[in-house]
């Protein structure tokens, strides 16, 4: 059959049925019915001009504040030169980023591989560990969240989001912070363990910190058995805890640090910082978009501002202030966290507080199940903004 203008290709029956209909979004998010149009620092405005305090940092992503002038300028300048070219050519921004990240994070001897998201960073970390020692088993922990791609989601402790195709016997879950269970696991099959992946402070799991003893034990056992220690720093890293990597607080050094969220202040970029003991070979890892010119400009701007404005110190100071004040408040069951990664555990009868902070006080916060308010604001949150939040929360606790 020859098709022509007079004898067109027949439209399949399914497409005929859909003709005239509009494509819709795939409905996977519980959405607040408001549109954020503009932001500056830790303040955002909706489409009808209402102002909100952003104690959520757009999901732990906004590290240096919305529309920071240096960030806007650096990305704009880069866009005027070139936005993208592939990893088949030299991209000087990547080299500058590796150097600056090494200095600011205190891991100058490490190597950087760039990608686009947190899940991808963990996926690459787990894969790299397996390339390194030729093993298959991964230890992850109860309450962990490592992303939604294949091995990252298999290492995530939430059966609901693991599709049958992602299920694997290679991931073993152990109880979080249980040193005895970890010791026993290594004693029985230590030589099969490729890597241990752990968040320094569990985010989605409800702002629960790994104990320093636990992190030290992971370090000791992974070193003893030549397994790789992967420090998932996607949410708890990049200065959020008041240390560059929250795992630093335990006085240990991991073999791979995965990062994303705060790295680009909203521009999609992720990465892994890799110990010098892991050697690369051409083709070992790869990506189309990872480390592109624009992403590097965004990430460089973030680190420059973090360094120049001492934002890690600010996160530590304002975070300590917030935590101390929150602990004085009645009705809160528990306050957890470090720096500007704070979990406020509320009793069930106060389950409306988070919603009302947004509706009545115009303050964005995050949440974790069952009833934890998660604070993940920009690292340059001011004390005045912290006070505004504390006053609003006090009002909610008295009236809700
Ligand atoms: C600790 C941790 N790891 C990994 C991820 C996955 O990151 P992404 O959503 O960028 O893939 C997240 C996201 O919330 C996270 O909190």
Image: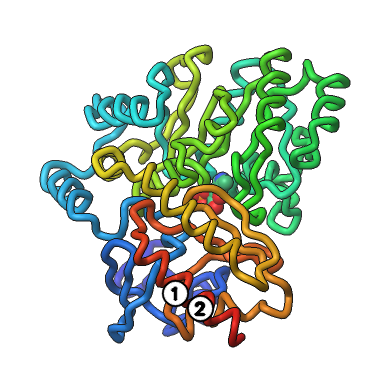
Residue 3 placement (x, y as % from top left): 37, 65
**In the rendered image, which quarter contains the C terminus?**
bottom right
Q: Tag 1 or tag 2, which sits nearer the N-term?
A: 2
Q: Are marks 2 and 1 in contact (CB under 8 Å)?
A: yes
Rendered image coloring scheme:
rainbow
Which residue corresponds to mark 1? 363
Residue 213 position by quadrant: top right
Task: Report the side of 137 relative to 73 (left or right).
Answer: right
Tag 1, which secondary structure? strand
The quarter holding residue 7 reads bottom left
Q: Residue at x 33, y 36 (%)?
A: 291
Alpha-carbon distance for marks 2 and 1? 5 Å
Compared with residue 302, is residue 54 higher up or lower down, i.e. above or below?
below
Near mark 2 (Cα within 10 A), the count class, few <14, some 14-19 or many ≥20, is: some
Residue 187 or residue 22, whichever sits in front: 187
Q: Which residue is drawn at 37% across and 25% down?
A: 102
Q: Which residue is drawn at 69% across and 23% down?
A: 194
Image quadrant containing the N terminus? bottom left
For label 1, being within 8 Å of ligand 1 is answered no
Measuring 32% from the left and 51% from the top, which residue is drawn there?
A: 64
Residue 147 coordinates in the image, percent (x, y): 59, 48
Q: Name the residue under label 2.
A: 357
Answer yes or no: disc 2 within 8 Å of ligand 1: no
Position of residue 8 in the picture relative to residue 18 (left or right): left
In the rendered structure, the answer to whether residue 109 lies left or right of residue 17 reads: left
Secondary element under disc 2, as helix, strand or loop, is helix
Residue 327 in the image: state x and y as whole percent. 60, 61
Residue 295 is tagged as none
């Amino acid at each position: 059959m020859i098709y022509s203008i007079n004898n067109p290709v027949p439209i399949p029956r399914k497409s005929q049925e859909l003709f005239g209909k509009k494509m819709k979004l795939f409905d996977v998010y519980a959405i607040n019915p408001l549109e954020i149009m503009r932001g500056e620092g830790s303040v955002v405005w909706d489409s009808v001009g209402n102002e909100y305090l952003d104690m959520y940092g757009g999901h732990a992503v906004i590290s240096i504040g919305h529309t920071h002038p240096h960030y806007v300028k650096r990305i704009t300048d880069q866009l005027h030169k070139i936005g993208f070219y592939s990893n088949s050519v030299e991209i000087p921004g990547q080299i500058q980023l590796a150097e600056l990240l090494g200095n600011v994070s205190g891991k100058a001897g490490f190597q950087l591989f760039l990608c686009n998201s947190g899940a991808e960073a963990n996926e690459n970390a787990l894969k790299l560990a397996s390339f390194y020692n030729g093993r298959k088993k991964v230890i992850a922990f109860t309450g962990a969240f490592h992303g939604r791609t294949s091995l990252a989601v298999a290492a995530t402790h939430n059966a609901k989001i693991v599709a049958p195709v992602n299920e694997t016997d290679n991931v073993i879950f152990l109880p979080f912070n249980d040193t005895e269970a970890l010791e026993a696991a290594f004693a029985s099959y230590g030589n099969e363990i490729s890597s241990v992946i752990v968040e320094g402070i569990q985010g989605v799991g409800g702002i629960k910190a790994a104990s320093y003893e636990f992190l030290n034990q992971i370090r000791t056992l992974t070193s003893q058995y030549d397994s790789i220690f992967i420090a998932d720093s996607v949410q708890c890293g990049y200065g959020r805890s008041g240390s560059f990597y929250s795992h630093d607080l335990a006085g240990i050094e991991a073999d791979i640090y995965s990062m994303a969220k705060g790295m680009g202040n909203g521009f999609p970029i992720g990465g892994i910082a890799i110990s010098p003991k892991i050697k690369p070979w051409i083709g070992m890892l790869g990506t189309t978009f990872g480390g592109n010119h624009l992403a590097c400009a965004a990430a460089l701007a973030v680190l420059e501002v973090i360094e120049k404005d001492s934002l890690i110190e600010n996160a530590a100071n304002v975070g300590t202030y917030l935590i101390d004040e929150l602990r004085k408040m009645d009705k809160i069951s528990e306050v957890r966290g470090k720096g500007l990664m704070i979990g406020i555990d509320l009793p069930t009868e106060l389950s409306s507080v988070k919603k009302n902070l947004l509706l009545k006080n115009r303050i964005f916060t995050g949440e974790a199940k069952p009833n934890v308010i998660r604070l993940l604001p920009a690292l340059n949150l001011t004390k005045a903004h912290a006070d505004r939040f504390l006053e609003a929360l006090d009002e909610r606790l008295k009236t809700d």
